Amino acid sequence: MIRAKDLELDVRHGPILYLEGLNVSFDGFKAIDELTLYVDAGELRCVIGPNGAGKTTMMDIITGKTRPDSGTAFFGQKIDLLKLSEPEIAEVGIGRKFQKPTVFEHHSVFENLELAMAADKRVFPTLFARLSGAQRERIDEVLQTIGLTEQVHREAGALSHGQKQWLEIGMLLMQDPHLLLVDEPVAGMTHQEMERTAKLLTSLAGRHSVVVVEHDMDFVRSIAKRVTVLHQGSVLAEGSMDEVQNDPRVIEVYLGE
C-alpha cells in the first residue's frame, strides 16, 4: 500500500492530480463528459459552474465514491485512484470536506481533533490514554491555523456555523493530506466568517493543494488565482478570474444567470 509519505518526491513540482478523459453516465444522463483537469502541487484551484455541471461527481470520482465509465485519475504520477477504495484514497493523502459540517457535536473542539487522528490506526490505541508531546503540538498547531484556540474546550455543537466549518477543516488537517477538496465552504456564513475562511484556505495553499467548489463569486474572486468552469460535465473555460468572467461562453451558461 502506498502512503502519503511515499508521494513527497512525486508531488514536489508539477501536477498532483491528473484527471484525463473521464466519462460517467447515470441512467443515460452524462454527468461527466470527457473531463480533463490538472491541479498542481500546492495550488489553490476554484471550480465553478451551474447546478448539474458535474462538480460533485468530479469530487466523487477523486475520492472513490463514484467509478467512471472510462478515463483515468492519478494522484501524483504513480497512484491510480481508480484502483483504490475510498479508505485507501483517504490514506494516501486526499481529504474531503462536504458542504454540511459533520463534527462530533457532543465532544469538545480538542476531542474532535484528537478523534481525527484515530484514522491512523497506529495512533488509535493511545487516544484518551496519553497523547505524546508531538501529538499535542500538532493539535495546538491546527487550532491556531483554524482560529479556534480560544474555543478548544467548547463542545462542537455550541460553535457557530462558520466555526464548525473551520473545525471540520482542522479535522482533515490532522491527517496532513496532500490534497484537500472543499465543497461550498462559505454557504450560510456571515461576511466576517467568509473573510476568515478566505484567509484560512489561502494559508493552506503551498503546504497543501486545495480544490474549492463554490457558487459565491465574490468569495471565489477573493481567493482564486486559477478558476476552472465546468459545464455539462466537461471543462468549459479555465484561467484567472478576470479571464473567466469575461469569457462569453461562461457569461452565457453561468454568470449571466
Image (spheres, rainbow, N blue to C red):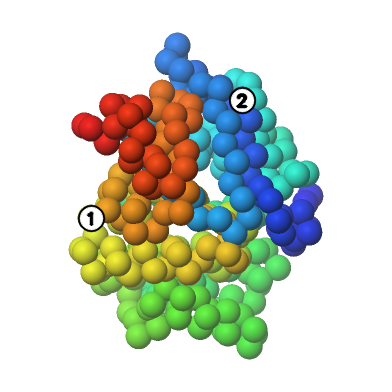
Task: State left or right for residue 28 relative to residue 257.
Answer: right
Viewer-side label of 1, 2? 2
The residue tagged 1 is 188
Height in image: 154 above or below 40? below
Q: Residue at x 51, y 66 (%)?
A: 204
Q: CA–CA distance between discs 1 and 2? A: 34 Å
The part of the image, by quadrant, that contains residue 84 is top right
Q: Amino acid at mark 1?
A: Gly
Secondary structure beneath label 1: loop
Height in image: 179 above or below 129? above
Of residue 235 and residue 183, the one placed in the foreground of this image is: 235
The part of the image, by quadrant, that contains residue 108 is bottom left
Q: Which mark is residue 21?
A: 2
Q: Amino acid at mark 2?
A: Gly
The part of the image, by quadrant, that contains residue 78 is top right
Asked if disc 1 and disc 2 are in contact, CB closer than 8 Å, the reply is no
Residue 88 in view, yes or no: no
Image location of residue 118, percent across then percent down: 59, 66
Image location of residue 67, percent across then percent down: 59, 29
Of residue 156 and residue 12, the one placed in the foreground of this image is: 12
Q: Residue at x 29, y 32 (%)?
A: 251
Q: Residue at x 70, y 68 (%)?
A: 122
